[in-house]
Image (cartoon, rainbow, N blue to C red):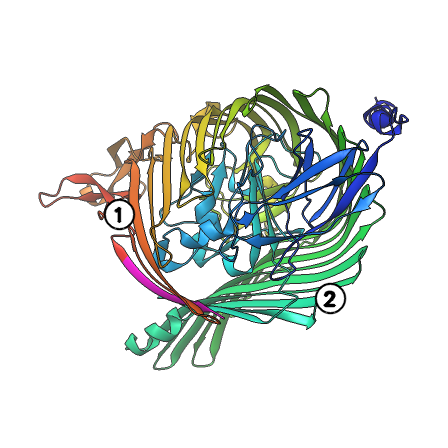
Amino acid sequence: MKNKFPLFFLLLLIPCLLPAQKVRYSISGTVFEKSSLEKLPGVTVVNLKTKSGTATNNYGFYSLTLSPDSVKLQYSFVGYEPVVREFVLTKDTVLDIELLTKELATVTIIDESEKVSENTQMSQVSIPVAQIKEIPALLGEKDVLKVVQLMPGVQKGQEGSSGFYVRGGGADQNLIILDDAVVYNAFHLFGFFSLFNGDALKSVELTKGGFPARYGGRLSSVLEMQMRDGDKEKYRVEAGIGLISSRATVEGPIKKGKSSFLVSGRRTYIDLLMRPLMKGPTKAGYFFYDFTGKINYQYNAKNSFYLSGYFGRDKFYSKLKEGLYQSEASLGWGNATGTLRWNHIWGDKLFSNTSLIVTDYNLKIKVDEFYQTDSFQLVYSSGIRDLSLKYDFDFSPLPEHFIRFGFVSTYHSFFPSALVVSGFGDGVDVKARKIEAWQSGLYVEDDWLITPRLKANIGFRLSYFAVQRKNYFRPEPRIAVRYRLRDNLSVKACWTVMNQYLHLLSNTGVGLPTDLWVPATKKVAPQQGWQAAAGVAKDFPEHNFALTVEGYYKHSRDVLGYREGASFFLIGDLGSGGEPINWEDEVTPGQSWSYGAEILLQRKAGKLTGWVGYTLSWTQMQFDEINFGEKYYARYDRRHDISIVAIYKATERITLSATWVYGTGNAITLPQAEYLVSEHDPTGQQASNFQFWDFRSDFGKKNDFRMAAYHRLDAGIQFHRKKKRFEQTFEFSVYNVYNRKNPFYYYVGYDNAGNRKLRQVSLFPIIPSVSWNWKF
C-alpha cells in the first residue's frame, strides 16, 4: 500500500510534465486596489475571446498560459470596477493591475464577477466584508461569526452565541484560520461575540464540504480570514463607539509604495459602566479586549514579507470584603497568534508562500479566600500552544491545469488541566501533564479543465500525527467535479475524506472557554469522516444573482463525548484512591451521521444585496455508553433553518438592512416523569416518616424533547455623511424587533397551585442600539 502514494503523486503530475504541443506564453502579475495598493485575493481574470481564465490567489498573484494571439483580458471583483486589457500576446508578459472601487469610479463597466457555475469548488461561500458591516447586529457589535451563522448548512448555538455548527459537526470540527494561524477559541463573552474585528479583515470565506487538499485537520468546515495589509499610499483612521465597546484602526505607509502597517484595537467598558452602580461589599466586573497588527514590506517585484498577529483576552472578576473575611475570584482566557510570511514569485508560472506561525490559547480560573490567619487558594488552568511551518506553491504549467502543492508541520504542546488547591487542609497539587505531539500534512491538488465543459479538482493529502510513541498515518483523497450543461448552469459533485487529531471535551456543546482541547493518544483514536455532496449551480449575470442547490451526506467516527456524570472539573482532581483522574478515562468514542439539502440565492452587487438560505437536515449520534447505546438526535439537529438577509442602499446617504431567521428548536433532555421514592432513615430502617422520601426523575431517552422554534427579526438604518477628507456613519438598529421570547433553556418549576410545570427562560428581548463610526 505504501508504494501507491508516490505513484499517485506521479500520475497527478503527469499532465504537467508532458511537453506542450503548441507554443504558449504566460501572462502573470499582481492585482492591487488602486487607492491603497492592497493586494486583492479572488479577482477573476478571464480571456473574453476564449472564455478561459483563472483567479488571483490569497496574495493577489495570478498566472494564465495562452497561445500567441490577440487576447482581451477582463479583471473583475465584487465592489470594484472591472478593467479590460487588449493586446497581442507574443512573449511571456508581466501585467500588474489596479482596480478602482465603484464608489470612486467615474466610468461604469458591466461587471462580470466570478460565476459559481464556473468554479469547480462547491459548498463554499465568500462573504464581502462590506456586507458584514451593514448587517444589523446584537448591541451594534458587527460579528463575522454571526454572519456566518446566516448561511445555509450552518447552525447557530444558543441565543446570541457566535458558536456555529456546520452540517451536523461539532464546535471543534471547524478550522478557523486568521492569516494562516489556527484560532482555537474564537469567542468573547462566553460565545456572545467573536474575536474578529471586521475593520481589520480583507476577506472571509467559508468551505462546508468538498475540501481542497490544501486544507486538513478538521471534519466539518474551514473558515479562512485574511487581514488587510494596510494602506501603502496614505494614512487612514477608522473608529467607532457603541453601547458596550469602542474600536479604532490606524493604517498607513512606512515607506510610501513599498511598506505599510495596520493596527486595530477594541475594548469593552461594561466594567466601567457597572462599577458606580455596585453597592455593598461585592464588586464584580467583566471586560474583553483584542488587538490586531500587521506590517508588510514589498522588497521587490518578486519578494514580499508580512508580519501579523492577534492578541486578545477576556476576564471575569469579583471581590468581596466583609469583616475579617475577604475573597477574590477570576476567570480569564485569551488567544495570541503570530504569523511571519514570505511570498516569492519564482517565475511567470510558480508562486510560493512560506509561513512561520505561533498560536497560544490558555484558560485560568483562580479563587483566593482569607479569614483571619487562614487562607484558601484554588487555581485551575489549561491550554494549547502550537509552532508551525507552512510551505505552499501555486503552479500554472498549462492553460488546463492549476496545481497547488505543499506541506505543513506543527509541534503541539497540550496542557489539558492543572489543579492547585491549598489551605484549609493539606491541599491538592496536580501538575499539568504536558502532552507533546507532531502533526504534519503533505498535499497536492490539480484544478484540471478536462474538456471545455468538464472540470475537476483532484487532490490527495497524506496526514501524520505522532503522540506518546504512537504514529498515525492517514490518506485523504479528495475529488470535486463540475460539468457545465450550458452557459451559467452547471452540475457539481464532490467526495472528501478528512481526519482530525484534536478533540474538544465539552459538557454543553456551546464552545465555552472551560471546554478542553486534547489530542488523539494511544488510548484515544483520531476523528475520521467522509462527506459526499452533489448539486446544481446557476448564475443570473444580468441580475447579479447566483443560485446553488446542494445535497450532502456525512459520516464521522471516533467522535468523543463525556461519559455519563463526568465533567472537566473532575479532570486532574483526585480519585478515591488518591490518584489523579485522567481525562482519557472520562470519555467514550462514538459516531455521527448528518445529511440534508441546502438552497442559497445570493446577490453581491447592486442597490439591493443579500441572500436567502434554507437548510433541511438530520443529525444523529451514537455512543455505546450513552443513551443505552441507541442513536439519538444531536442537540443542534435542526430540521428546518431559514435565513433572509437584505441590504438596500436607498440613497448615497441612507442604507437600510434587515435579517429574519427561523430554526427548528434544539433537541434537549428533560424529565419525562417523577416518582416519590423512599429512603432509609439514619438508623438503617425503611423510611416510615415522610422526611425520608425523595423525588426521582425519569429522563427517558437522550435529547427526546424539542425546544420551541426560534425566530427573530433584526433591522437597522445607517446614515452616511461624506466630506472630502472625512466620512461618518450613524447607525440605529433593533435586535428582535417583534420581541420574540425565544427559549434559552427550560427548567421544571411550580405554578400558583403548587403543581410542577415546565418553565422557559428567554435571554434577549427587543434591544435597540446606536453606534457612531467615522474614518478619515
Q: Which residue is at the far right?
A: 19
Mark 2: amino acid: Lys
Residue 405: where, in percent of width, then height? 78, 38
Residue 470 within the segment the image draws in magenta: no
Asked whether the viewer can see residue 233, the reply is yes
Secondary structure mostly taken by the magenta-highlighted segment of the chain: strand
> Which x, y percent locates residue 609?
41, 43
Pointer 2 residue: 258
Q: In terms of depth relative to the viewer, which is nearer, 95 or 764?
A: 95
Q: Secondary structure at mark 2?
A: loop
Q: Which residues are magenta?
A: 768-776
* Magenta span includes 772: yes
Q: Residue at x 25, y 53 (%)?
A: 766
Q: Which mark is residue 761?
A: 1
Rendered location of residue 492, percent (x, y): 58, 22
Tally the numbered discs.
Answer: 2
| In this view, 691 is above or below 106 | above
The secondary element bearing badge 1 is classed as strand
Picture quadrant where residue 706 is located: top left
Which is nearer the eye, 292 or 571? Answer: 292
The amino acid type of the residue labelled 1 equals Val
Q: Residue furthest left?
A: 753
In percent of the image, x 88 and y 24: which residue is there?
21
For residue 114, above or below residue 199: above
